[in-house]
Amino acid sequence: MADASSDTVDAAHLTELLRAAGMVHDDQVTGIVVERSRQTLISTIRYLRVDLGPRLSPLRLFLKTRRPDSTVAIQESREADFYSLVAPLSPAGLLPRCFDSVNGGAAGWHILLEDLTEPYEVVSEWPIPPTLEQCERIVGAHARFHAAWWDDPRLGRDIGVFSDENGGFERTMADLSRHFTAFVDQLGDRLPAERRRIVERLLASAPRLYGERYRPHRRLTIIHGDAHVWNALFPKDPKSADVRLIDWDGWRIDAATDDLAYMIALHWYPDRRRRFERRCLESYHATLLASGVRGYDFDALWLDYRLSALWQVLTPIWQAAVKVGPFIWFPHFERIMAAVADLDCLEFLD
C-alpha cells in the first residue's frame, strides 16, 4: 500500500481494496494525488484524491502512517490493530470507515480511512473547549461505544488483553516508578513536596486499588485511551449524523470512566470542570443505560470516575517519559492535581 516514509500508494492494490469495499466495480484507480499532508507527534497524515476514471467522481481518503522522525518514544501502532480487530465489530456510525489497516510495528504501519473533512470538523481549536451541548454529544458517542463492548465475553480472549495477564500491570508500575524518579529530577523544586507524596502514595497503593477494581474483570469495556474532545469529529450538520471518534492508538480494556476522567479531569480547567463535570457524567450515564448497560447506577459511575481521576495523576509522568512536550504534560499535571483535590480522591489512599 505505502511504506511509512513514502508518498507512494499502489493504484492496483487500492483498486482491489475499493472493490472489496463495494466502492467500485469494473472501474479502477487511474490516479492518486496527495492534496495536503500534516504531521502529528507520532504519525504522518496525507489527504488523498483518488481518481476513478471518467464515469465516477473522485474519492477522498485519509492515509495515516508512522512518522519516522518522531521524538516520541512510541513506534508501534495499536490503531492499526484497532481497525483490524475492533472496528469491524463495533456499532456503525461512530467510527470512520476503514479500507486497509496493516501493523508492521517499527518497520512501518498504515491505516487508510474515509476522509471525513467535508461533512465533519474538529469540534474547536485546541485548547479552546467545546460548548456544553457539544461535550454532551461527544460523551454520548463514547457511551454508545462503551456500551457495545461492556463486559463482552470476547474481551481478553479474542479482542485485546487484560492488563493483569503475563505480569503486564507489574511491568507498567515498575516503569512508572522509574519514570517518576526522572520526573522528580526534571522538575526539582517546581514539584511541591505535597504533590510528590501524593504520587508516592498512589504508587504504593496501586496494587490494592488495581486488584479491587480491575482483577474481577467486571464492568470493563474497550476504552479509547486518548479521549480528549479533539479526538472526535463533529458533524457540520448536527441533525444528519453522530459524532465520529478518531485516533485509536491508545485503546485498551479498562474501566469506561478512564476515558471520562482523561477527557474532563485531566483536560478541563477547574472552573469549567466544576460547573459542567457532573452534568456531563449524568448525560453519559443516561446514554449508557439507554444503550443497554444494566446494574451500574450513577453512584457506581461516580465512584469509578473519582478513582479514574486519581489514576490520571500518572498520565503526565508517562507523557514526560515518552518525550511528549511539556506544553502538554505540565498543564495536565496542574489540572489533574486540582481535580484530585476537588473530588476527594485521596480518600482512596487512606
Image (cartoon, grey):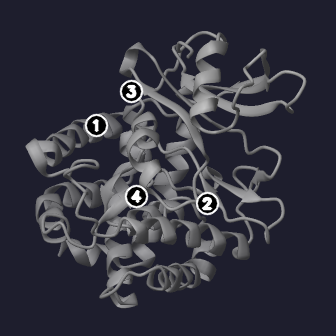
Residue at mark 3: 76
- Give the numbered dot on residue 144: none
Q: Earlier in the sequence, mark 1 or mark 3?
A: 3
Structural distance between the alpha carbons of marks 1 and 3: 20 Å
- Provide the residue designation for mark 2: 93
Q: Which residue is mark 4?
A: 223
- Mark nearer the viewer, 1 or 3: 3
From mark 3 to mark 2, how far is it between C-alphas?
A: 27 Å
Amino acid type at image mark 2: Gly
Dot 2 alpha-carbon crowd within 10 angstroms: few under 14, some 14 to 19, many 20 or more: few
Rendering coords of residue 260 (x, y %): 47, 67
Quarter placement of the C terminus: bottom left
Sequence-first tag of 1 and 4:
1
> Which amino acid type corresponds to the residue marked 3 in the rendered image?
Glu
Q: Nearer the viewer, residue 136 or 171?
A: 136
Identity of the residue furthest to the right in this view: 54
Which residue is pictured at 48% across the width and 50% down the height?
Answer: 226
Q: Residue furthest front?
A: 26
Earlier-in-chain disc, 3 versus 4: 3
Residue depicted at x 56% and y 83%: 283
Circle 4/circle 2 CB separation < 8 Å? no
Distance from label 4 to label 2 (Cα)?
17 Å
Categorize mark 3 by other alpha carbons within 10 Å: few (<14), some (14-19), many (20+): some
Q: Is residue 338 visible?
A: no
Left or right of 155 on screen, residue 310: right
Q: Tell me the CA gap for discs 3 and 4.
A: 18 Å
